[in-house]
Amino acid sequence: MKRIVILAAIVFAACAPSVPPPAVAPRAEERYLIDPRAGFGATVSPSVEKKFDAAWRAFAAGVLADARQRLTDIRTKEPDYAPALLALAAIDLREGNITAARAKVNEVRNARPHYLAAEIYDAEVSIAEHDLKRAYNLYREIAARGDAPPMAAQRLGDLQTQYFELLYGAALHGPNEENDIALLREALQVNPGASAARILLAQKLMAMRRFEEARTEIDPVLNTGEVDRPEVQQVLAEVDLSRGRYEDAIARYERLVRRGGNEALARRMDEIKLQYAEANMPLQFKRAIEDDAVTRADLAVLMYWKVPSVRFAQNLPTPPIATDISETPGREELIRAIALGVYSVDPVTRRVGPGAMVNAAALTRITARLLALRGADCARGLPQSDPSRILATCGITDPTLAGADLPVSGRTAAAVMEQVSRALK
């Protein structure tokens, strides 16, 4: 009799429906896969609800085969019950089958565009697909809904951080300035208060000489504690310079250098001071320094304004008269070059040739003669027949290195005269 009772109990247990395991705490990422019934709205029979409860508890407990079977049974009888399809997508996600999950979520979303749980699952599948932009935008829409679950705001905050760091990191190490600027603009839409990204954006715009855009982008930083950062002040200085406010730009750079700025800042300050000086030069200087191929008259002008030993030379003899300089721009500078002996007047024609082009070889000879005439220590005792040697000894870049017959630009000639000025100090 006892044996019969035991057998009956075994048979009954085999025939009875299995009891789903108790639900357990979801895994870290899966806690965002909310109950698929959230926002579904449509009513179903109590039996379907009961079956789905059992399936969802099986999923939460990690018994995926049982959960899948229960959900498949529900869909066989209720093919339009969307929560079951979303729950199957959740199983796909846990199993790493992202493609299958995406197909199921898309099917639900196409049928019910404003279904809350489907929107959340769409975002979570996007995260699994590494599409942070789509996930972030979806959660922004979700968090704005009146029926959004509390976790939506937290998830949005996490995605905001991740997506911002993705964009900022790409721009920080990007090889393309235009692309970097676009990335930083997008990053600032995600997190407008990110001062580091805003400063980097302004710097990149400044590097591309888009100064007004740089000023606009840096503006929100000016009312914060970041305003005194060297990077911010440098952007402001370059914007000042672009607007012709040399003195303001120099003042900013001087403050940076006094505060312990690096050599690059000090060099940039000196460059701006030089630009400021050039901006206040007479018209003949501006024309000469911008020439692509300087003449003897241009070189005389650059020599005069770049070399103090030429400009402030005293007790000079009366220069011989040159008949071809009366209408020449830079006439006074030419006369000074003649008086110093740097230029000579032809004794027969009485001409000095102010319009003759100066090539690299001529510039080297004239520079060597100028150094010797103005008493440069480095040129003392060296023969004028070897002008390249004189320039090398005085630490001056020899223009003939680029080609003896090549024309010389005003900028090149000015740079040589600046070196002469240093050699004569």
Image (cartoon, rainbow, N blue to C red):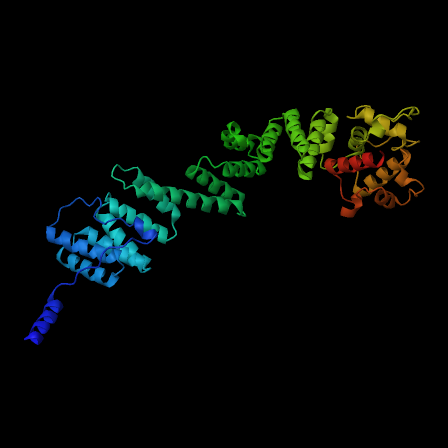
At 31% from the left edge and 39% from the top edge, which residue is drawn? 143
On screen, 227 above or below 182? above
Q: Quadrant of residue 75?
A: bottom left
Residue 391, horizontal then vertical, whole percent: 84, 42
Give the camera-side residue of 48 and 365. 48
- Quadrant assignment for the N terminus: bottom left
* Name of the residue lying farthest toward the front: 2
Q: Can residue 324 be seen at all in this image of the molecule?
A: no
Residue 404, horizontal then vertical, whole percent: 80, 46
Q: Is residue 171 left or right of residue 346?
A: left
Residue 24, horizontal then vertical, whole percent: 27, 55
Q: Is residue 14 left or right of residue 184?
A: left
On screen, 359 above or below 75? above
Q: Quadrant of residue 410?
A: top right
At 51% from the left edge and 31% from the top edge, which residue is drawn? 221
At 25% from the left edge and 39% from the top edge, which residue is drawn? 147
Residue 79, horizontal then vertical, whole percent: 16, 55
At 55% from the left edge and 39% from the top edge, which residue is drawn? 204
Q: Can residue 10 be seen at all in this image of the molecule?
A: yes
Q: Is residue 369 left or right of residue 225?
A: right
Give the camera-side residue of 110 and 130. 130
